[in-house]
DNA sequence: TAGGTTTGCTTCAAACTTGAACCAAGTCCG
DNA sequence: CGGACTTGGTTCAAGTTTGAAGCAAACCTA
């Protein structure tokens, strides 16, 4: 099949997305590294645990929720365990399993650092969005996530005959 | 100041964004690693060079365009140079400077792998977006990027009195 | 119930990223 | 000029990520 290159609109969107996501992640990582001593992903792991019943989650569930690989999670939890923010426990029902538990210390850290984090998310993201755009962003991202995960049920743009407009490598 | 927590809408948007961006980057990295033997960022560096006049750019310019740190770029260009995709040249006007030049081999690699990459960007992102959403995404991202970079001229949402709605750590 | 497969998680080496420290070369005044 | 500061880029160690390989418990299925 001959390549369906990106239209100019798509290119602009793609470039803008790349730029924004880099800038956003960098800013948030920097702030959390400063104030919580860990990168964003690690903070997210703690945040996810804090919302789970009993503040505990099986490793695979946690990987699922955070959208990261199991090996990445293993490394992260090992570090967080060294920090004392998380504790590992074996599963009674499935002896292969391992459960990550947010410790009191981890909870305290989260409570201490959440305001600064939220403030940064606001300053970097939501302060630049109108309420409508917040909704649009959610829909866009939810659709994309659904599309990538299921990879079956497409939502939009199927079978659209795209014209060849340009041939830049698109970043 | 008492923390302005995220509203439920903002939380949903934020979570969806985190998930989508992880999934997207993972998918694209995997494909490019497969087909081009390098992660997305490295491909982007080549793509940026390919669009520059004479296919050459000062290191700092390149870092600027790709939104990454100079040290990250140094490492990346060193690797790409080993691969033969890029060559370094000194600047005549400013002898501190260094210029990255896309080689013919790099150009060929780009031409060879661009179709697959574009296809992946489509499959993971644009196939799930309506044309309006493409425009919305661009506006959102452009605004966010502008906001983070300049950090001065805000575009929307300034001085809005947010109500305290929830206190989850928000990921 | 033994063999084969899957599932849950870890391990390991190689690659990549980070941020601070560093080295020149340019620039600015006094 | 000559020191102080800035700018362009690299280096280094410590931390993180990747993907393939490994290991053991659970799940078949004959």
Image (cartoon, coloured by chain):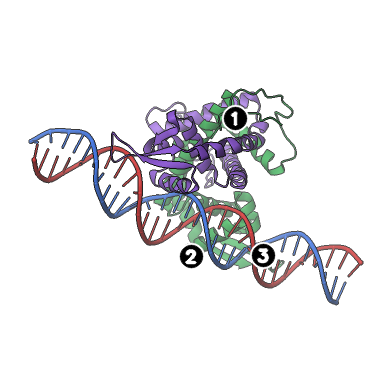
Chain colours: A green, B purple, C blue, D red
Q: Which residue, given by chain and number where applicable, does mark 3 sit on? A: A97
Q: Residue B119's x, y, as percent? A: 65, 35
Report which quarter residue B137 is drawn in. top right
Residue at the location (58% across, 55% down)?
A: A49
User: Which residue matches tag 1?
Assistant: A136
Q: Quadrant of the N terminus of chain A?
A: top right
Which chain does the residue under circle 2 lie in?
A
Chain ID at mark 3: A
- Going from N to C along the chain, the mark reached first, 2 or 1, is 2
Q: Which one is nearer the viewer's eye here, D9 or B68?
A: D9
Q: Is residue A125 visible?
A: yes
Q: Is residue B32 left or right of residue B67?
A: right
Q: Residue at x 73, y 30 (%)?
A: A158
Report the residue marked by disc 2: A82
Work out whether residue A146 or residue D3 is closer to the camera in this orientation and state it: D3
Query: Can you give x and y, in whole percent of width and height, for residue A82 in the image?
Result: 48, 65
| Same subunit: marks 3 and 1 | yes
Structural crowding at the residue carrying mark 3, measured as other residues with C-alpha within 10 Å and reported as few (<14), some (14–19) or many (≥20):
few
- C17 is higher (above) or lower (below) than A21: below
Kindly state the secondary structure of the residue where label 1 is placed. helix
Mark 2 → mark 1, Cα distance in angstroms: 40 Å
């Amino acid at each position: 099949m001959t390549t369906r290159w990106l239209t100019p609109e798509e290119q602009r969107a793609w470039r803008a997305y790349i730029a924004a996501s880099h800038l956003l992640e960098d800013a948030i990582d920097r702030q959390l590294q400063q104030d919580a001593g860990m990168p964003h992903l690690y903070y997210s792991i703690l945040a996810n645990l804090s919302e789970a019943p009993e503040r505990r989650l099986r490793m695979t569930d946690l990987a699922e929720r955070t959208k990261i690989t199991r090996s990445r999670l293993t490394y992260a939890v090992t570090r967080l365990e060294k920090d004392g923010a998380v504790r590992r426990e074996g599963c009674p029902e499935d002896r292969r399993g391992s459960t990550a538990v947010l410790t009191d210390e981890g909870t305290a850290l989260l409570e201490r650092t959440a305001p600064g984090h939220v403030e940064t998310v606001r300053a970097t993201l939501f302060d630049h969005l109108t309420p409508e755009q917040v909704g649009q962003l959610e829909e866009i991202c939810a659709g994309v996530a659904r599309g990538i995960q299921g990879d079956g049920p497409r939502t939009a743009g199927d079978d659209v005959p795209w014209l060849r407009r340009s041939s830049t490598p698109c970043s």
